[in-house]
Amino acid sequence: MLAEALFFSAVLFTIGVFGVLIRRNAIIVFMCVELMLNAVNLTFIAFAQSYGAAGQVFVFFVMTVAAAEAAVGLAIIIALFRHRQTVNLQNINLLKG
Amino acid sequence: MLPLLLVTHAAAVAAQAATAAPPHPLNGTVAQWLWLVPLLPLLGFVINGALSLSSVFHKGPADPGAAHGDGHDHAHGHDSAHDSPHDHGDHHDTHAVVRHRHAGLTSIIGPGVLVLSFLLTAAIFIAMRTAGGGEMHAPFIQRYFSWMPVGDLQIDATFQLDQLSMMMTLVVTGVGMLIHLFSVGYMRDDPGYPRYFAYLNLFVFFMLLLVLGGNYPLLFIGWEGVGLCSYLLIGFWFSEKANADAGKKAFIVNRIGDFGFLIAMFLLFANLGTLDFTGVREGASSLPFGGAVVTAICLFMFLGCAGKSAQIPLYIWLPDAMAGPTPVSALIHAATMVTAGVYLIARSNVLFSMAPVAQIVVVVIGALTAVFAASIGLKQWDIKKVLAYSTVSQLGYMFVGVGSGAYVAGVFHLVTHAFFKALLFLGSGSVIYAMHAAYHHTGNHDDAQDMRNMGGLRQYMPVTFGLMWIATLAIAGIPPLAGFFSKDEILGAVFARAQGSTIASAHLFGIAGSTWLYFAYVLGLVAALMTATYMTRMMIYTFHGPNRTGEKERSHLTEAPWIMTGPLVVLGLLTVAGGWFNIPEFAKFLGPVGGLDHWLEPVVGESTARVVAGAPEMSSSLEYGLVELAILIAVAGITIAWTRLKPQALVPKRESPAEEGFEKVLVEKYYVDEIYDAAIVQPIVSASRGVLWKGVDTGLIDGLGVAGSAYAARFIGWVGSQFQSGQLGTYAWVLVVGVLAVLGAFSIR
């Protein structure tokens, strides 16, 4: 059971990573980040089955942080869109050195 | 506070006890107060310095700016390179005397501390003569505190009193006291009067430190101190650039010599492990005789002496030192400073007696200096310049003496020279004082020091005239005056050593030492002839013949006040009687023979014996012959000047034609200053400008160092900024690749 769960979460995480790397749309990148978080959550829960409830407690923390992050992140994206009329990350390079 | 430091004296006593020696005969006598001798002048310096500072805050007359504040015209003919008994403050149209408001107090404290110091020295001298039956073999050493305890280097603040330092202390405080008293008359109307006495006191303090210090570093402090004070005093009237330059010249030339002295000290410590006089004296025998080490030490030490005592090639500062007030010249030339080099060699007699090659160098340099300076003195017009070159020449004699291992003769000449040269300088001070006062009355700005403006002064200042003739005959070597005995002793010693001594059997440049010594002897005779000539010339031009001062000025020429002539009279007595200190064998009808020889025996006896060991005895007929030759030469020199010079033909300075031919070379002092300027000063200046300033400072430090490092920082920043593309995708890729790399690295391990 553990192996399947870990394999599944690894697949989810990889999908998320590739989404972040490849996609240009900020919303989709954002969603891929969420995917990675949740893949980690799945790992926590899978391990919690055999090592005790600590993993489940961590999942709650991760979900809390993810919710906060989603709120802040979406707000930034909306502000960005209002400002630049785009959410394409290639066009947003204000941090260029 | 200082008496408390004497508690540590117990340690010195304990150290003596450790060597199983009986307590020193001077213990418990007045010699315990030895530290007061130099401390009194230091106290005078502090008080007089405070007095001179106090007027600065009160906007007193000592402020040179205030003295010039009346729009006084500087375009007058006053020769700025020459000193005048008063500062510029008295050149006002009103000719009002601007006396310092603390002048009265300074007149008491300045000379007062020297009088006390001299009295104490005299008391210690008497104690020395009586304690232990008058025979004192070991030096009396007082240890005050540990000064430089650095590993193996243990240097204590100690004073060493032996026969040599006692004699030097007597000369320094005695002649110094007379010069201080003279200065009261000479400098009283100067606005910088307390400052003058502060420097003068400090000078004597450092000189006493020099002669009383019990080890080389302490001597060196005094050595540097007199260098500093000579700078301060030569440049005393510093608002004239020529005077300030002369001070700087003295300071810098002395530094070159001090470098040699420092190297000598380093070598001493490296090879003997001690810098105490007693330690060096005991340890020197471990060095090989005539070896490279001891020769190098002596040669470097002599470089220091050449700087301080004005020998070729470092003599150039002394004639320029005339820029200071005349009593300062007397102090520098007679009692202090320039005698330091002679003292140092006499003090290091053990080392020098082991290095015959170095001794040859000292003798030859001394003899060359004697002739060279004397020849310049033949054609100088400035009365003080004549005396200055005369000092350089006489110092050459002293070095011939101490260099040839005749330490007593060299030191003896030092003492007699202190008497007659102080007399000559203070006498010339009197003359300049009178001349300046005369010009001052009539508002004339002619040169008060040029002999062409003097002449016939004997009827106006008979006391100075008589005393200066005594000193002139003494320096020329006419018996029975002081200079005759000391000069003759030096020449006789050189001749005797040429016939057989450790120096005579050594070789320098493949030439035997005896040849060098005969050479030095002949040079000494030539210098003696010139000395007699130029001194007589100076006297003739100054005091004889018609007066050339000027019609109006003539009536104002008078003898100086008693405070100035008094010291002159005392010095005159010493000049007459100074030779009695060391009566030679052939003049034994004058009194007991060889007083100074006997007195200095514990200090230099061993070294002298070492030099002349196994030498053949000079026959008395030869000795008489040499003495007669010396007298003949002195008389010949005076006669030449007396018959050849025509003071009637002289005209005042501003009407005199320029010299031509070799005379001009002499007047221009062989162009040595110009040669040094072209060969040393100008290359250094242009190298400083071209290489050090433009190349090293602007190019290397500013360009490569400061601007270069800024460019480097900017370039590194630019390289780093190229990674900041602003593309989130790129950042993410880098992040992921990095994470994978780290994970990969962990998994491989």
Image (cartoon, rainbow, N blue to C red):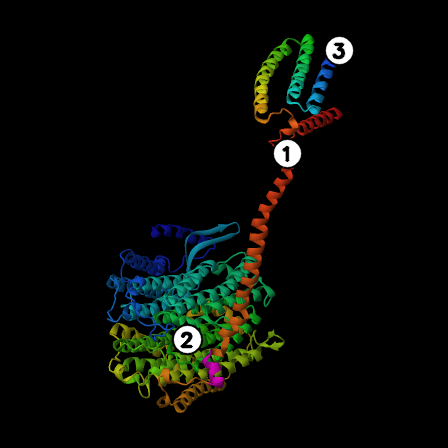
Q: What stretch is highlighted in magenta?
A: B660-668
- Give the mark nearest the N terminus, 1 or 2: 2
Left/right of residue B439 with respect to residue B18 in the rendered view: left
Picture layout, residue A64 above or below residue B438: above
Residue B666 is one of the magenta-drawn residues? yes
A72 horizontally vs A16: left or right: left
Looking at the rendered structure, the secondary structure element under dot 3 is helix
Identify the amino acid type marked 1: Gln
Secondary structure beneath dot 1 equals loop
| Res B450 visible | yes
**Which amino acid does the dot numbered 2 rest on?**
Ala
Q: Mark 1 lies on which chain?
A: B
Q: Residue at x 50, y 50 (%)?
A: B150
Does the magenta run of residues contain B675?
Answer: no
In the displayed structure, B286 sits above or below B588; it is: above
Q: Position of residue B615 (x, y in %)?
A: 55, 77
In the rendered image, which residue does mark 1 sit on? B724
Observer-side mark, 1 or 2, equals: 1
Question: Which secondary structure lies at badge 2?
Answer: helix
- The location of residue A68, given as percent across then percent down, is 57, 16
Q: Given this view, does label 3 or label 2 mark the residue nearer the observer?
A: 3
Residue annotated with mark 3: A4
Give the farthest residue toward the front.
A85
Q: Are marks 3 and 2 on the same chain?
A: no
Would residue B583 be visible to someone looking at this image?
A: no
**In this rendering, the label closer to the viewer, 3 or 1:** 1
Asked where in the image residue B718 lies, by quadrant, the reply is top right
x%, y% of residue B83?
35, 72
Q: In the rendered image, which residue does mark 2 sit on? A: B388
Q: Which chain carries label 2?
A: B
